[in-house]
Every structure is written in structure tokens, then in C-alpha cells.
Image (cartoon, rainbow, N blue to C red):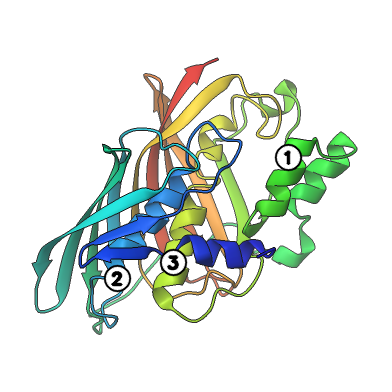
Amino acid sequence: MTNPAERLVDLLDLERIEVNIFRGRSPQESLQRVFGGQVAGQALVAAGRTVDADRPVHSLHAYFLRPGRPGVPIVYQVERVRDGRTFTTRRVTAVQEGRTIFNLTASFHLPEEGAFAHQLPPRHLVDPESLPKLADEVRDHLGGLPEPMERMARRMPFDIRYVDRLRWTKEEVKDADPRSAVWMRAVGPLGDDPLVHTCAVTYASDMTLLDAVRIPVEPLWGPRSFDMASLDHAMWFHRPFRADEWFLYEQESPVAAGGRGLARGRIYDREGRMLVSVVQEGLFRKL
């Protein structure tokens, strides 16, 4: 497969070993650890495959416990915590080489008519096609992409476009608001399984969220002065969506202290309807 979107769908297609046990691939890549969005997306697939299709996931809460090793399969063990009249709860433990690396609890809700509805409006409802692709913006600034970044761009399953221009110097980032916004969509069709689209957005939600923490500190696409890792991740799914259609991901960091930075995200469709809410804390240590 050469299409990164097809590879993403394949990555989310877990092998069922037992009724409640699944195995996921972990591609051999030149990374120190398995990408957290991959583990979260695969864990949610495992949970969803044990739930009736008429109950979409409405929330997940997860902890990254140990870094996963690229190239080594990950086993997902699902505990059927509760099957109620309208809510279903699953707990998933991700194990690699005999060690737990990730825990996730997901709740599924039989759709029902709400008594009322409201939402905060988006701040950046611009046309995504009017914005440069991330790889093109970086390539134009650097006069080309270094080979590792070129390989990453070819494997990227999502088209990412920053609403605000990227900052490239310490002077530009000084006193910048800890906010970021990107338009995203899968680079190809993902099929029609709603669970795959939900898990694809779960994958994507970990790609840029901690940008908001770093924006006042250093350029996002220059040399890093900090090592960073996701500590936990929470999502709430408000409305149905497709991950292969444009969605706006607005991100902000209300606080960074004690070596940890908190980031919040809101995901909207092109009509400005809020689809997903995200919260994550990351660990930041000087290199």
C-alpha cells in the first residue's frame, strides 16, 4: 500500500486473537517511541469491536504509562465493565513485551434526542484550501525538506494546514499566545465504518495538540530544546463526522508548570459545528 490513508485504515484493522483480545501492528519507524495517537486509536478500535454498532463512543480517558517500541506488536485486552440500557463501558489495557504501556476507558452511548443544545463558536472558520500544506510551508522556508522530514511527509496520513503562519525564530515566538489552529483531513478515503473515522480522529488528535504548549517557547518546526511526551488524553465526541473531510482543530494551553503543560482542543466541521473536545497533558524536559 502506498496511500497513507490506506495504511492508516490497515493500522486500525486489529487482529482478533480471542473474544476480548486483539493484536495491533506497530510499524518499524525511526522514532524513539510508538506514536501515542496510534496506541489510542488502536485501543479504541479494540473497545469498539466488543460493542454493538448502534452505540458510538461518546468519551474516552487514557493514560500513557510507558513508551512503546516501534516494530513490536501491541496486544489489547478488553474488559467488559458494563452493558447498560443506553451506556456501555469498556476498559482496555495495551501490553507490549509483557508490560502494560497504556490504559484506556471508553464509554459508548445509544443516540438519543437531547433536551437542548449549545456550543462555543470556532475562532478560525477560514477556507482550508486557501492555506498552504504543512510540508509545503516548511519546504518553502527551508528551501527543501531534510530527508527524515521528507519521509515523514510521505507517510503522513493527514493533510495538515496551519491557520496562522508558522513562526521560525525565537523573536517571533516571544510572548506569543499559547494557541494554535489547524485544518486537517485524511489524505484519502477511509471507508464508511463510523468507528474507523472516530479512531482516525483519535489518532490525529495527538499530532498537534501539544503545539499550543510550545508556541510561546520555541518554533514548532525548528530544532527542539525540550523532550516531550504525552501523559494522558481525554476526548468527548459530540456529533458524527468523517475524518476524510476537513475538520478544524483549535488548540490552547491554559497553563504550563512543574515540567507539565496542559492543552485543550476543540474540533469543528466546515459549518462550524463542534464535533469533538480534547484535553491532554504533556511532559516537557530540557534536552
Q: Please, is residue 38 above or below residue 145 in the view?
A: below
* Residue in the picture at 64% in, 61% down: 4
Res. 166 visible in picture: no
Residue matched to label 2: 49
Amino acid at circle 1: Met
Pick whichever of labels 2 and 1 is earlier in the sequence.
2
Residue matched to label 3: 13
* Residue in the picture at 69% in, 24% down: 223
Q: Comparing marks 3 and 1, which lies closer to the viewer?
A: 3
Q: CA distance from mark 2 to mark 1?
A: 34 Å
Amino acid at circle 2: Arg
Residue matched to label 1: 149
Measuring from the top left, give residue 216's x and y in whole percent.
59, 28
What secondary structure is found at the residue carrying circle 1?
Answer: helix
What secondary structure is found at the residue carrying circle 2?
Answer: loop
Pick whichever of labels 3 and 1 is earlier in the sequence.
3
Amino acid at circle 3: Asp
* Residue in the picture at 27% in, 38% down: 98
The picture quadrant where one finds residue 44 is bottom left
Quarter holding the C terminus? Answer: top right
Q: CA distance from mark 3 to mark 2?
A: 10 Å
